[in-house]
Structures are given as C-alpha cells and as structure tokens.
C-alpha cells in the first residue's frame, strides 16, 4: 500500500469508484443475491432485532434482507450515489423501516451501546481503516449485540494472498485489502468480539463482468487476463480459475461470521 493510500481521507478512492459505478452495482447479480447473502441471513438469525445498521450498504441488498428481521434498519455508506440507488430500490420494495445515512464506517454517528445488530457484506475490504471500523462497531453494539460480516478473504499462503490483493487493486483502485481468516480472528479477539458461527461460501465471478463493473482500463484488463490465464498452479487451484470461451470463471473464498460483543 502506498503512502498516498494510507494518508487518503476515509474512502476518497472508494467514493470516486463507487460514485461513478453506482447504477452498475444496483443491478450486479452477485450483489443482488448470492451464497454470501444467504449465509449472512442464516448467521444473523431470525431476530427480531430492534436496531440494525448495515455498513458499506452499496445499493442496499443486505439492508433490505435485514429489514425482514429488524424493527428499524439504517443503511449506511460513504458514497452518496450508492445511497441514492439504495433509496430508489428500497422505495420500489416499499420498505417502511429503512433509513439511509451517509457516513464512513470508521466514524459512525450512533451512540455507544445502542445497536442490536451490525451487518456488512463485501465492503470491509474497501474500508480505508478496517481496524478503526471494527473499533466503531464494538463501541456502538449493545452488550450481547452481534456483528455479522461477509467478506472476501485471501488464503493463508502469503504468495497466493499477495496475488489476490494485487489483481484486486489493479482491477479496482479503491480496493484496500482482503484479510486472511487468521487476521480476522485476531482482530475480533482483540476487541472482545467472540465468533459464534461461521460459513465459508465462494463468491463466483466471471472475469469480463468483474472488470466491466469497475471500468478497469483496457490495457490493465489485457494484463490481468494474461495473469489469470498464466497463474501458478497454487493460485489457479485456490481461486478455481477456469477459462470459459472468451471469459474466465473464478471464485474468491468468502468468510461469513457472526461475532458477539460480551
Ligand atoms: C461492493 S459495495 C457493497 C455491497 C453491499 N454491501 C451489498 O451487500 O450489495 C462496497 C461499498 O462500500 C462503500 N465504502 C467504501 N469505503 C467505505 C467506508 N470507508 N465507509 C463506508 N462505506 C464505504 C462503497 O461506497 C460501496 O458502496
């Protein structure tokens, strides 16, 4: 990570990327519904939760799912055009218990110990300061409250992990870091958040759709395609890389967990 990225204000790259691409994320089939959303629903449980907050809500699909088991859901995101998509889709679904708040996950505008449930799906790896966001989650959760996260994770092998984070950053300049499962376990334990359930689904992706979603420059797409097709055997195996005509199918490992505040 370069010094500029470290010094950038919360999510300025994310706002540029997701601001421009918001309508595409609103119809992206992997975001509308996939195995990670099903796992997140299962691990959140039936509720009912009085107050739930979804972080990095994007076009709102996780917040919409949580609106079925919560009295009130606040969908939060740093990027205004994403929240506009969430507002439009929430209105189409006639959800009466959904509110929207523009905020970085690293500085939440909620009182301490005020929330029963915090969710976050495929967004933590975009946060400028993931650990600060976790500190905030710990602060705002009530004792006994739960954090339920689904996020892409990198394998424990350093070389394979580096490969994944490298291609992610070249494809999407707002990518920060896919952590390893062991790193998540340490960060949660350090904050007194106890994992009470987990699943490991895969996020299935198609290369052409994946690079189109982030408007990756043409020259980079060519270089990325070559790197996927000529990846080492451990990388091809870890990410299930399969040529498919003029496309490439692959998948990221995804950690979905429920962690409870003591
Ligand atoms: C892939 S989208 C999220 C998808 C969504 N959670 C879902 O379930 O469909 C990632 C989102 O994270 C948001 N984001 C990036 N950095 C952020 C930050 N520091 N704080 C809050 N949101 C952030 C982006 O604006 C974007 O909308």
Image (cartoon, rainbow, N blue to C red):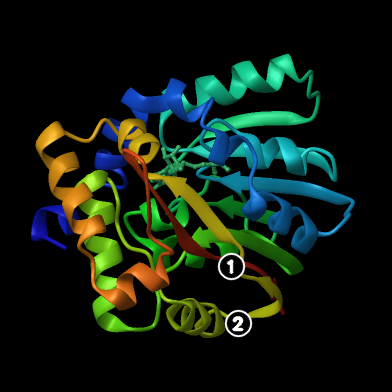
- For image coordinates 72% across by 52% down, the residue present is 38
Could you tell me how many numbered marks the image carries? 2
Question: Is label 2 in a helix, a strand or a loop?
Answer: loop
The answer to whether mark 2 and mark 1 are in CB contact below 8 A is: yes
At label 2, counting other C-alpha atoms closer than 10 Å, the crowd grade (few under 14, some 14-19, many 20 or more) is: few
Residue 227, by quadrant, is: bottom left
User: Which image quadrant is residue 72 in?
Assistant: top right
* Observer-nearest of 252 and 176: 252
Residue 126 location, x and y as percent?
37, 51
- Counting residues from the start of the chain, the first of labels 2 and 1 encountered is 1
The quarter of the picture where the C terminus appears is bottom right
Q: Is residue 101 above or below residue 9?
A: above
Secondary structure at numbered mark 1? helix
Q: Of 232 and 212, which appears nearest the observer? A: 232
Q: What's the mark number on residue 138?
A: 1
Question: Label 2 CB, ligand 1: below 8 Å?
Answer: no
Residue bearing mark 2: 192
Residue at point 76%, 47% (across, down): 51
Is 22 situated above or below 192? above
Residue at screen point 24% across, 73% down: 232
Visible residue check, residue 233: yes
Residue 22: give x, y in percent of width and height. 42, 25
Query: Is residue 32 or residue 211 the one in the foreground?
Result: 211
């Amino acid at each position: 990570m370069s010094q500029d990225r470290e010094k950038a204000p919360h999510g300025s790259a994310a706002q540029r990327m997701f601001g421009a691409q918001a309508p595409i994320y609103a119809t992206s089939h992997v975001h509308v519904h996939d195995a990670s959303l099903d796992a997140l629903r299962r691990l959140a449980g039936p509720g009912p939760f009085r107050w739930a907050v979804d972080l990095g809500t994007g076009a709102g699909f996780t917040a919409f799912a949580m609106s079925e088991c919560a009295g009130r859901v606040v969908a939060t995101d740093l990027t205004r055009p994403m929240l506009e998509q969430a507002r439009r889709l929430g209105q189409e679904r006639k959800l009466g218990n959904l509110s929207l708040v523009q905020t970085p996950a690293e500085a939440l505008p909620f009182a301490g110990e005020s929330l029963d449930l915090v969710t976050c799906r495929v967004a933590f790896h975009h946060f400028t300061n993931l650990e600060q966001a976790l500190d905030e989650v710990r602060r705002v959760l009530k004792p006994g409250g739960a954090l339920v996260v689904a996020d892409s994770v990198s394998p424990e092998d350093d070389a394979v992990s580096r490969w994944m984070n490298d291609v992610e950053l070249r494809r999407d300049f707002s990518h920060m870091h896919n952590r390893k499962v062991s790193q998540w376990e340490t960060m949660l334990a350090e904050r007194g958040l106890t994992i009470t359930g987990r699943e490991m689904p895969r996020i299935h992706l198609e290369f052409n759709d994946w690079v189109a979603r982030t408007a990756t420059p043409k020259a980079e797409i060519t270089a990325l395609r070559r790197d996927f097709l000529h990846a080492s055997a451990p990388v091809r195996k870890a990410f299930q890389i399969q040529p498919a005509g003029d496309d490439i199918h692959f998948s990221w490992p995804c950690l979905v967990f429920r962690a409870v505040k003591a």
